């Protein structure tokens, strides 16, 4: 991380903007229930909401089918490689 601190502010922002969606995509696998096909989105320690994959498919909010296939592939990798799951 020391190299990051030597970058100019504009480069730091660019790296963060390009990296955040990728990290969110990977983390979405951890909050997804593959049996029920929903995400659990926590608000705080006591409250959460379940966001159904079907709801997103109905509304065509983003490339949901592609993301679901991606999550299935990542889930298979995580199930076979516990180190990968620890890294997430």
Image (tube, helix red, strand yellow):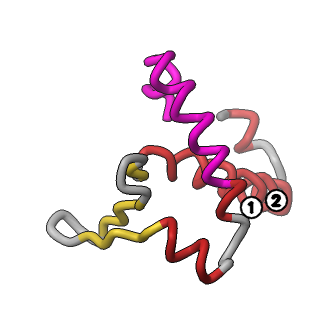
Quarter-of-image position of residue 60:
bottom right
Q: Which mark is residue 14?
A: 2
* Residue at position x 72%, y 54% in the image: 66
Where does the magenta region start and end?
67-88
**Could you tell me residue 52's position as x and y percent?**
43, 69
- Residue lying at 60% horizontally and 72% vertically, measured from the top left: 57
Q: Residue at x 50, y 28 (%)?
A: 87
Mark 1, residue position: 17
Q: Does the magenta portion include 85?
A: yes
Give how far across and how far down residue 82 sits, in percent: 44, 18
Q: Toward the viewer: 63 or 7? A: 63
Hey, which quadrant is residue 18 in on the image? bottom right
Report helix, strand or loop for mark 1: helix
- Residue at the left extreme, as displayed: 46
Up-down: is 41 above or below 80? below
* Mark seen at residue 29: none
């Amino acid at each position: 991380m020391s190299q990051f601190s030597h970058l100019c502010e504009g480069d730091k922002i660019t790296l963060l903007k390009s990296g955040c969606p990728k990290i969110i995509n990977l983390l979405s696998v951890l909050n997804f229930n593959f049996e029920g096909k929903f995400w659990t989105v926590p608000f705080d320690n006591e409250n959460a909401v379940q966001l159904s994959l079907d709801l997103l498919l109905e509304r065509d909010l983003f490339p949901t089918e592609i993301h679901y296939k991606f999550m299935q592939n990542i889930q298979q990798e995580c199930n076979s490689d516990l180190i990968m799951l620890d890294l997430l």
